[in-house]
């Protein structure tokens, strides 16, 4: 139940934004006080709404538990910006601590795809329960794997030079989708149809 101590609890004392630098420390803190891990996407209304509720609750309960927030979009951006090792570390740690949270396994598979390790990513996805394996997030990672298998390598794309024919555009679009730049790649693919 909420306590009357909430006036003395500041949100920054009980809400932690997770990143590669503090994930292990937060998991160690969970041995002393429960830590609710909240994965969210600032670009999704339902995610922001749930996070707002969780933030209010953690303050109301005056530190009876901590809220560890993991911004999925920021970690996706870190992947695309090249901080693959940091993202891999976060998801490997989370998978080890919370093996029943399949979202972490799907996110880890996404990291493996970004590293060009599609067959390992496929293994991670294949080990999910059927209902998780067939859910949209896992299907999206599988699609990235398949696009990656069909796409030319970055070197081969560079060798296309300034070509603007439909085959060159198609190959560039496949590479964009395989690299996680879905909107740009799919826009070109739709234009080519």
Image (cartoon, rainbow, N blue to C red):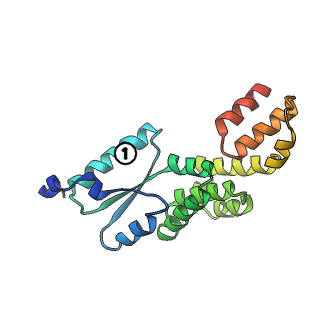
Q: Quadrant of the C terminus?
A: top right
* Disc 1 crowd, CA 10 A, few/some/many (<14, 14-19, 20+): few
Whether residue 162 is visible to the viewer of this picture, yes or no, is yes
The residue that appears at 26% across and 48% down in the rendered structure is: 56
Q: Where is residue 44 in the image (x, y as percent from the top left)?
A: 46, 39
Identify the residue under disc 1. 50
Give the residue at the far left of this rendering: 4
Q: Where is residue 17 in the image (x, y as percent from the top left)?
A: 40, 54
Q: Position of residue 186 (x, y in %)?
A: 70, 34
Q: Is residue 126 left or right of residue 193?
A: left
The residue that appears at 36% across and 41% down in the rendered structure is: 49
The residue that appears at 59% across and 49% down in the rendered structure is: 137
Residue 93 vertical position relative to residue 62 in the rendered view, above or below: below
Residue 157 vertical position relative to residue 5 in the rendered view, above or below: above
Q: Is residue 139 left or right of residue 10?
A: right
Q: Is residue 5 left or right of residue 50?
A: left
The residue that appears at 75% across and 25% down in the rendered structure is: 191
Element carrying mark 1 = helix
Q: Where is residue 29 in the image (x, y as percent from the top left)?
A: 35, 70
Q: State the image quarter where residue 124 is shown.
A: bottom right
């Amino acid at each position: 139940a909420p306590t009357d101590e909430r006036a003395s609890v500041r949100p920054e004392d009980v809400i932690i934004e997770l990143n590669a630098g503090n994930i292990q420390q937060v998991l160690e803190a969970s041995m002393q006080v429960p830590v609710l891990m909240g994965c969210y996407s600032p670009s999704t209304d339902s995610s922001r709404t749930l996070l707002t509720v969780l933030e209010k609750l953690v303050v109301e309960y005056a530190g009876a538990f901590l809220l560890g927030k993991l911004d999925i979009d920021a970690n996706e951006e870190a992947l695309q910006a090249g901080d693959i090792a940091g993202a891999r570390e976060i998801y490997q740690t989370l998978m080890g601590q919370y093996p029943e949270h399949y979202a972490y396994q799907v996110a880890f598979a996404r990291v493996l795809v970004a590293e060009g390790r599609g067959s390992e990513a496929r293994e991670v996805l294949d080990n999910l329960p059927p209902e998780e394996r067939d859910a949209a997030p896992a299907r999206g990672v599988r699609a990235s794997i398949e696009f990656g298998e069909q796409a030319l390598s970055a070197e081969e794309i560079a060798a296309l030079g300034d070509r603007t024919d439909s085959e060159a555009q198609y190959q560039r679009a496949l590479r964009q989708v395989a690299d996680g730049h879905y909107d740009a790649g799919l826009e070109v693919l739709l234009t080519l149809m």
